[in-house]
Amino acid sequence: MLLIMSALLITVRLNGPLSAYVAAVKRGDAAVFAYAPSELPPPGKASLLEMIQTEAEKKRIAPVDARVDRVWKAIPGYNGLEVDVDKTYRLMLRVSKNEPIRFVYREVKPKISLDDLGRVPIYKGNPSKPMVALMINVAWGNEYIPSMLRALKKENVKATFFFDGSWLKKNADVAKRIQADGHEISNHAYTHPNMSQLDRNAAYNQIAKTESLLKSTLNVTNRWFAPPSGDYNQMTVDVAAEQGLKTVLWTLDTVDWKHPPAYSVVQKIRARVEPGSLILMHPTDSSSQALEGMIRAIKGKGLMLGTVSETLSSDRASLVEARP
């Protein structure tokens, strides 16, 4: 008995009360557990700990590694989820023994992240994450921006606006209004060129000039570059990466520059949207009239809407859902 007591006291000093208690339970000698009175688990709590551990194994969701897909290129990873046994146990020690177990969870990051994939363009988020993002490219026309902002605010949705630098230079006041509404701001080159047709220096400067304006005008620290018209080559991806930006395109295109009727845009999104979709639009009459219906169609399929950064992050969607 003295030897058991000594072993337990050493375990407590090395590992702390809860770890020592777990070790004691596993050895079957919890009856002689050497805690101070305030640290002793109340009667019946040994079985509670075992229940928590058993359920924790069942509830664990493994993380999903980022990967490069043959069609969709870079696919972000998605955090796993596991029960924090220690915090759950300590929480349940403070409640009535008849209370159901209230599990405390923590996220588990994947071993391979988006950054580990190198210089690869991105077309969509992880299909395990029930979230989509609205990408609004702005290079000309301000007429429909106010109504789009109203629709986004009404539906409590934050979008990502990609600004053409020459537009931003002339319309800083409009850009600041968009930013004031809490939307994400990113880079759409400077003069809306076909990036693949530029030499390296010109391609670099198209991105750099807009990046400089984003910083000086809006104090934005940006992460994304959306090539105009979706035109790019590997050099485009490389020069963006050299400036700390990932090249992002889209999963679904509203094709709103052709001015389709709003109902057809909503119908298209409802039929094709899925977890991880990046939806491209512009400040046009079609998207302005369709936006509210699009958002409701997306929500109606049980999907959340976040910014591009939120959708492409490995964070679990529940974190964005809790955003004020």
Image: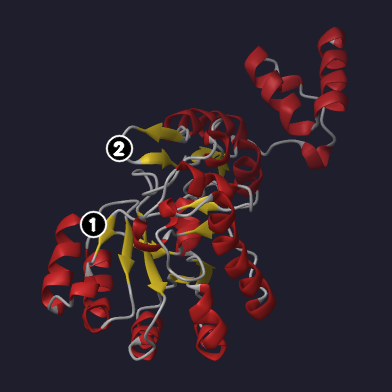
Residue 280 picture location, percent across and down: 32, 64
31 in relation to 160, above or below? above
- Quadrant of the frame with the N terminus: top right
Which residue is pictured at 72% across the width and 32% down the height? 18
- In the picture, measured across the screen, residue 139 lies left or right of residue 10, that is left
Q: CA distance from mark 1 to mark 2?
A: 17 Å
* Residue density around tag 1, few if under 14, some if 14–19, many if 20 or more, within 10 Å: some
Q: Would you identify the image quadrant in which residue 38 lies?
A: top right
User: Looking at this view, is 105 or 107 the one in front?
Assistant: 107
Judged by depth in the image, the label closer to the viewer, 1 or 2, is: 2
Identity of the amino acid at label 2? Val
Residue 71's tag is: 2
Residue 152 picture location, percent across and down: 37, 80
The residue that mark 1 highlights is 273
Residue 82 picture location, percent across and down: 52, 37
Identity of the amino acid at label 1? Val
Secondary structure beneath dot 1 equals loop
User: Looking at this view, is 24 or 316 the one in front?
Assistant: 316
80 in relation to 133, above or below? above
